[in-house]
Amino acid sequence: MSAALNHYQALAAAAPQTHAYQAIGRERLSLVELPNRKQEAWRYTPLAPVLNHQFTAASREEGLLEPEDIASLRVTPADHVCIVLLNGFFMPELSTLPPQVGLEVLDLEQAIQHSAIGIERLGSLSGACLDLFGAVNAALTGSGAYLRVTEKLTQPVEIIHLNYSFESEVLSNPRVLVQVAANARLNLIEQHAQFADLLGMSNGVTEIFLSEGAQLLHPRLQHDSVRTRHLSHLYVQQAATSVYKGTSLALGSAWSRTEFHLDFVGEHAHCELNGFYLAGEQQMQAMHLDVLHSVPNCTSRETFKGILYGHGKGVFDGNILVKKDAQKTDARLSNDNLLLSREAEIDTKPRLEIYADDVQCSHGTTVGQIDPEMLFYLRARGIPKAEATSLICQGFAAELIAHCEYPALEAKALSILQERLAPVAAKL
């Protein structure tokens, strides 16, 4: 048995036992294999950056940050709800939690202790923890946030994740449980923000339950420190006529893997999943998608784009499964990539598995370089080459970033993108 597996089993054994779901994680850790290139889900993902470090479980640390530090990171107004998770732990002294009708926000640990409504759902979507880090998160369940929405909220809710500690090589294991009741609506904005350049790993799991007629707009921006390893598992279950619109932007971290798992359990539901990734020197960005259409008359749109430069590496692995009973399914999957150097690499694998005969489904992928005719057009109008190149790249990304539908977050993402691409464009 490898040292890495021994290490994480020891972390799980030492963790306080706060929820029954932790037993599933501990059990899986005794059975699970380490991720390896022979496993289809990990075939194209380099593993040394996460398996060669024995990250230690984070603990709650007080006094590391001040509210002013959070204010500089926020994209929502100061009087709106903002939840701060520091190394995975809910920090009420750094959060802004004004009372809001139709919204319940709790520290996940408190929600477990007080048997909050729906807490029994915790772990029901992430299920059997089929990989090492899913099992680790389950075994260490306790830190994170609980949100329950029962009204149509007009103000967005922001969650800021920070990895910052006096210790080194800290493993954060945040878990977020979101429940949106029938006909309720929520705009949930998430940021994985950079505060310091520290080596660590974020291993998060988010489970979202949308009841009948519920609506959730869910933009997410990951701009972690380049030394941070970032692993995110997102699970969404949609009941009848619900709508989920999620946009994930992966700009930071040396090693980043985002997994999307979506399941339709009621008819006439609609999902939009959008993703953008930027990978440069010493960066790997991976996005993995599993959409399950198991009931009739549902629609989904999955649109992903990436820009890669230097020795950057990208991985896109998207699968839509349409079961036999899911007639009248309408699903469209696309992945487009822009490579700015010969050394950049993208492994892209969009897939459809269709077992129903009355469906409209499509999938496709493109990999290319900057269009020379487009570049010539801009230069002919007096725009310098570097600026023209940057404009083309920003235009390629901006179309997808606009799906965030929150101008302040979009502006922040575009600013980071412009800052990263300007020196690259100058060398092309």
Image (tube, rainbow, N blue to C red):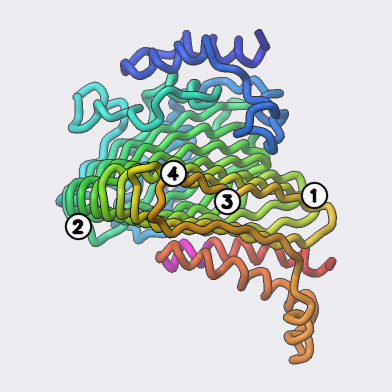
Residue at 48% of width from left, 42% of height from top? 290
Disc on the earlier residue, 1 or 4? 1
Q: Tell me where the magenta segment starts and ends, as one range.
A: 406-412
Q: Is residue 324 visible?
A: yes
Give amino acid for label 3. Answer: Ala
Q: Are marks 3 and 4 in contact (CB under 8 Å)?
A: no
Give amino acid for label 1. Answer: His
Secondary structure beneath label 3: strand
Instruction: Answer with the quarter of the image where residue 324 lies.
Output: top left
Give me the C-alpha separation between circle 1 and circle 3: 17 Å
Residue at numbered disc 2? 152
Residue at 52% of width from left, 62% of height from top? 412
Residue at numbered disc 3? 250
Badge 2: how crowded within 10 Å, few (<14), some, or many (20+)?
A: some
Instruction: Indicate the position of residue 56 as horizontal and vertical percent values.
Output: 57, 20
Closer mark to the observer between disc 1 and disc 4 = 4
Secondary structure beneath label 4: loop
Disc on the earlier residue, 3 or 4? 3
Q: Are marks 2 and 1 in contact (CB under 8 Å)?
A: no
Badge 1: how crowded within 10 Å, few (<14), some, or many (20+)?
A: some
Instruction: Indicate the position of residue 98 as horizontal and vertical percent values.
Output: 23, 49
Give me the C-alpha separation between circle 2 and circle 1: 45 Å
Instruction: Answer with the quarter of the image where residue 380 lies.
Output: bottom right
Give me the C-alpha separation between circle 2 and circle 4: 37 Å
Residue at numbered disc 4? 355
Disc on the earlier residue, 1 or 3? 3
Residue at numbered disc 1? 311
Secondary structure beneath label 1: loop
Give me the C-alpha separation between circle 1 and circle 4: 39 Å
